[in-house]
Structure formats: structure tokens, C-alpha cells
Amino acid sequence: MIAIVGPTACGKTALAAALAADIDAEIISADSRQVYKAMDIGTGKDLADYTVHGRQVPYHLIDIVQPGEKYNIFQYQHDFIKAYDDITSRGKNVVLCGGSGLYVESVIKAYHLASVPENKELRKRLEGRSLAELSAMLQQLKRQNGSVMHNITDVDSVQRAIRAIEIETFNGEHPTESAVIPSIDTLVIGVNIDREERRAKITHRLKARLDEGMVDEIRSLLARGISAADLIYYGLEYKYVTEYVIGKLTYDEMFRQLEIAIHQFAKRQMTWFRGMERRGTKIHWIEAAWPMETKIEEIKKLWH
């Protein structure tokens, strides 16, 4: 398997699709928000990228969950292995692509994870705590468990922090014994993008998505009966645009705060990938600025 990782706006999807078309592969997405149906613009699905030279490159684990539901890494591992087995049983290669570092690492390192039930008593105790307090509690639990899960990337709201504490508490009390993921030989490619270029692309892309109708997308999700709290839970675009739609932020406040949040998110993604390297994953870095043909040739040289 080849995994393509990197921060938001580095061109991962277009590269994964071009590579998959070249090596007769199918793509498995590793994105914690692109699993949701009808959440297209805000999650940046960029589905047009999956058409290469007029041919559709098959992709998996996008649009598989109803909006409003809570999808987790345990479900992702199960869905990943089903997709992986399906693709390889047909003699195709697999390209894993995404910016959710925890999802990528959970399958290439075969994390031992269990489905974690809701702990109502714990939730009651944590009610009313601030995000800063919850984050500090989470860091302490992670140290106790020796856990690499729940990078701050994934806990940018009180709800998410409480769920992360719930999971870490459960894992500390119930160590798991079996993984659902077999050991998969994986070449990991990181797409490195110049910091200023990344910042410019993020701002340009945010403006483009707002022009494409991101506000209307969120209005239509609310009109379908999905609560504002559920949308805010998904973070980033869904958090800030929902707060604008319900009147909590002005348009300018929403844009400024969301732009800053996406820049911070991209930095945290890079921190996660550097952490993966420290934890023993070899990442071969290539430059986002290289021509597509050069990137693909470089990856194929490393692959064979």
C-alpha cells in the first residue's frame, strides 16, 4: 500500500488520484469528516480530482455516514479493512490518502482499539468544564496510558474533548488484546508545502468554498433537522459557519476566526506527521511544488 499524507491544501487528493490512475489502484480516504454525506464543500471532498484523463478513479470511505452521526476511529478501522480486502481481492493496488494523521497511523501501525461505550457518569462530572481544563485532563490521561491518540487536532470542541477523555479512561481500564488490522507493508509519502504557499492556498480555498455555497450547505443541513451542536462538533468550517448562521458571529468574524483555525489545524497536522516519524514511521517527503509527473516518478522509484 502507498499512503499519501500532508497538511490541508498541499494537493494530496490530486496526487493520490493521478498516482492511482497510473498504477491501477483504488483510493481509500483517511479523512475523519469526508465520511459524512451531504457535507461536501466544508469537508473539501474535491470529488472532481478523482477524474484523471477523463477516467474515474474509484474511491472508498467517502459519503458513508449520515450527517449528525458520530463516526469514530474504531468504525474507521473496520471500514478500512473491508475496503482494503475488497480492493486487493480484485488484484488492485491501494492508495491511502488523507490528512487525519490518527486514522492513517491507526491502520499502518495496526492500533489495538475497542468500541468505547458512553460513560454517562463521567460525562456528568465533566459538564461545565472549559476546553482548556478538559485538554489538560486529556494530556494527563494520555501520559498515564502512554497513548498517542487524540492529538489536539481532534479535540477542538468541548464535546470532542469529553469524548476523548471517555475513550482514554476506558482504554486505561480495559486494555485491548486484538487488532482488527493486519500488518500492511506501506510506503508513506509526505507532501511538503512551503509555509507561505500553504497559507496563501488555505485563504484562497476558503474564499472559493464560501463562493461555492458553503453557507447554504450548512443552512440546508440545519433545515434537515441536524442540530447546530452536532454541526459545531465537526469543527472548523462546520463550527464557525454554523455559529455565523445562528447569529453568534458576524460574517467577518466567522471568516477571520475560521481562517486562523484552518492555519492552526494545518500546523497541528504537520506536528502529528513529525510525531509519526519519531514513533518509527518512515515518511518520504516530496515537494508540493514539483510537477505531477515528477512526483509520480519519484513515488514509483521508491515503491519498486
Image (cartoon, rainbow, N blue to C red):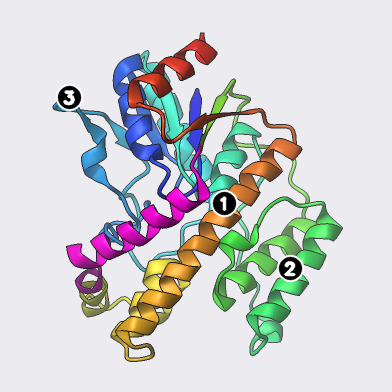
Front-most of residues 64 and 120? 64
| Residue marked by disc 1 | 269
Q: Residue furthest front?
A: 196
Q: Residue at x 63, y 25 (%)?
A: 183
| Residue marked by disc 3 | 53
Callout 3–callout 1 Cβ contact below 8 Å: no
Q: How many marks?
A: 3
Q: Residue at x 44, y 25 (%)?
A: 85
Residue 209 placed where, x, y %?
A: 26, 62
- The three-letter amino acid code for the residue at tag 3 is His
272 relative position to 210: left or right: right
Where is residue 47, by image quadrant?
top left
Q: Can residue 234 be spotted in the picture? A: no
The alpha-carbon separation of the residues under discs 2 and 3 comes to 47 Å
- The three-letter amino acid code for the residue at tag 1 is Gln
Badge 1 element: helix
Q: Nearer the viewer, mark 2 or mark 3?
A: 3
Mark 3 / mark 1, whichever is N-terminal: 3
| Residue marked by disc 2 | 138
Mark 2 / mark 3, whichever is N-terminal: 3
Where is residue 245, by image quadrant?
bottom left
- The three-letter amino acid code for the residue at tag 2 is Leu
Mark 2 / mark 1, whichever is N-terminal: 2
108 relative position to 237: left or right: right
Badge 3 element: loop
Residue 214 placed where, x, y %?
A: 25, 67
